[in-house]
Structures are given as C-alpha cells and as structure tokens.
Amino acid sequence: MIVIISIFVLTESLQRTGVTEQVGNILLKVGGTGELRLTIVVMIAGAFLSLFMNNIASAAVLLPAMSGLAKRSGVNTSRLLIPLAFSTILGGTATLFTTSNIILNSVLRDNELPVFGLTDFAYVGVPIVIVGIIYVAFVGRNSLPGDSPLERTQMPSRADRGDLIEAYGLGDMLFKARVPEGSSLIDKTIAECSLREDYDVNIVGIERNGKRILHPTPQRHIRHGDILVLEGDEADFRRRDIEPFMEFLPETEWRESDLESNAIDVVEAMLAPRSRLIGKTIRDAHFREKYGMSVLAIWHGDREVITDLGDEKLHFGDALLLQGPRERLHVMKDDPDIIVLASDEEAEITVPGKGRAA
C-alpha cells in the first residue's frame, strides 16, 4: 500500500514539475505521429525504465504523458497504454530490480543459498524484451482495441477538439431563435419557460447586446431581443411554436467553440464501472444540480441520443457530452461516479524548474 501511495505522489510531482510534458515531447519527437513507431518507442522507453525501477514506478513515470501524447499524435490512448504495460513487465524480466526477483533473491539469501547477480537475468530477459516488443508492434497491435465511443475524439479524424459537435451529430440539433416583441417568454426565467418539459428544447446559450451567455442558469431571465441558442428538433419546435413566441433565424454551421468561452467548456465524460448513476435517468440523478454541468448529448452503444435526454437511462460505457463552468471540472474529476475525458485542460506546472528533484 505504501508503494502504491508513493507512486501517486511521484506521478503528481512529475506532472506539476513539467517532467510529464517533457517526456511526452521527447517521445513524440522520436516516434512521430505514426502509431507503429510510437508503439515501438513507448515500449522501448517502458522496458528501459523497468530495467532500473519497479515495474509500477516505471509505468507511473510514463503514464501521465501517454494521454497528451496520444491526443497530439491522434492515436487511440488504449493502443499506447496496453503496450506500455506489457513493456514494463517484459523489461522487469531482464533485471534484478523487479519486485518478484528481489523477493526471490531475499529468500535465497535467507536460506544461505547462492543469490542472483544484477545481470544474471539479462541472458534470458533481454531476448524476451526484444521478441516481445517486435510481437506487440507488428502482430499483437492488430488485436488492440480500435475506435470506441469513449475515445473516438482521440482518433486521427477527430483529433481536433472542434470535432466533438460533429462526433455527436449535435450540429443538426442546434439552432437560433430571437425573442420578438410580445413574446410570452419575456421577463420569464428559463425555469419558468418550460421549454424543456413542453417542447423538449434546451437553452444552451443566450446572445444579448452582442455578448454570449453560455450555460445560463435556470434563474436567468429572458429579455426582448435575446437570441436563444437552442438544442432540439427545430422542425418539431417550429410546428408547435405559436407566433410571436419565437422568431427563427437562418441556419448556421456550428463548431464546438460556439458553445465555449473563457469560463465555459465543452467536455466528454463517461460513467465509472461501479457508478451510482448507472440505471438512473439524467432527471432522477439531478445531474445539473449535482455537477453544475448540462448534458448536451449521450453516446449510447453505437448511437447518439440528443432528444428526450432527461428520460434516457444511463448505462456503463455511455459517453456524455457536457457543457458547464471550467471550475466544475475539478469537482467532477474527484467524483468516483464519473470520468472526465477529452478535456483540453492542460496540467498546470506549479513548480517549474524542479523536474530533476522530482
């Protein structure tokens, strides 16, 4: 337990001192953006470190850099993490510094038997490392997980963060409408409008006097002339709209940046394996009240769910597209029920220049 706790401390220190970023830059420079070269470079690095370190420690040194490396190279994260795990195990077979080898050596010494030397395992271990890296890189890599709903934004075709809107098909469900004079929405709060309950339409933003108000609270009042950014079935809403309820504006091409600002972010998250949210609906879980984030879409299995989100039951493996304050991301990351994915929030280097000490 002490070793595992120490690994967490080591990993955090590497992140805060900038070592993680430097390691990722080096691996990216050597391995390029090709998956095959990156796999070989990552496995060589993992095997090399495990020659001199505990397997868990060597993985911990490289693990934080893998996510950023995968994102910048456009490679699925799991296709780098699994080879990394194998490489640290392979490298541990070639040296005395592996936990099992150290324990074995201690047993031999306690029983007054000849002990192993530092390089005694290398004669068998080094060939195993070489063959293992070649096998994983050229054969085993073909059996690694491919595109999944959890990591699709890290694949080459979706490496750009702006692709999240396209990935969920949300662009077709976003539209703008102006609040005209005489509208029944004027001076009402968003909660009082009941647009979600009556029309299955969500207000994800308000444009007022040339300024954008993203992720508005339910207590926000709607004023004459406000342009509402709505999420839902526009055609269905038009059929049920009663003039001068809303004034619909021409279609526009949506990008993720349209729903983001300095304070508001759009991120992707998934449910943890034993999440208490599994089996509950967004409404039953009081998701917005608990996390301060709005659910824009859900990726369930091989389909996206954009309408009737409040009544959609959550399942393990569901990916959620969320919009909300950046400051709430730290709260979500500490919550055991949900795992934040594909966030562009870079790790803050709080103690630069202390990398060697870490």
Image: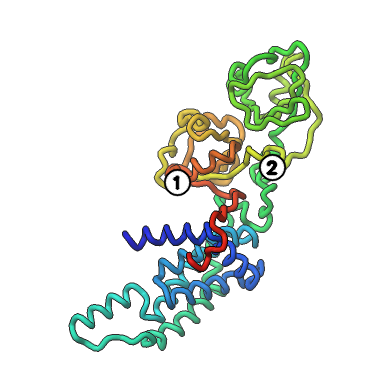
Residues 52 and 289: in front is 52
Residue at the (54%, 69%) spot, across then down: 141
Q: How many marks?
A: 2
Q: Establish if 85 lies above or below 345.
A: below
Residue at the (49%, 41%) spot, across then down: 331
Q: Which comes sooner in the sequence, label 2 or label 1?
A: 2
Find the distance from the CA under tag 2 to the CA under tag 1: 25 Å
Q: Which x, y percent locates residue 39?
A: 57, 70
Judging by the rendered image, the residue that carries numbered circle 2 is: 256
Res. 66 visible in picture: no
Res. 58 visible in picture: yes
Residue at the (79%, 33%) spot, across then down: 251
- Determine whether the residue tagged by mark 1 lies in a helix, strand or loop: loop
Q: Looking at the picture, which amino acid does disc 2 mark?
A: Glu
The quarter of the picture where residue 146 lies is bottom right
Dot 1, how many residues are within 10 Å of its Cα: few (below 14), some (14-19), or many (20+)?
A: some
In the image, taking residue 10 as reference, residue 162 lies left or right, namely right
Dot 2, how many residues are within 10 Å of its Cα: few (below 14), some (14-19), or many (20+)?
A: some
Residue at the (45%, 46%) spot, across then down: 272
Q: Residue 272, labelled with which disc?
A: 1
Q: Which x, y percent locates residue 162?
A: 69, 47
Q: Quadrant of the N terminus?
A: bottom left
Residue found farthest to the left: 111
Q: Which x, y percent locates residue 143?
A: 52, 66
Q: Which x, y percent locates residue 145?
A: 53, 60
Residues 155 and 6: in front is 6
The quarter of the picture where residue 104 lies is bottom left
Q: Looking at the picture, which amino acid does disc 1 mark?
A: Ala
The quarter of the picture where residue 298 lies is top right
- Determine whether the residue tagged by mark 2 lies in a helix, strand or loop: helix
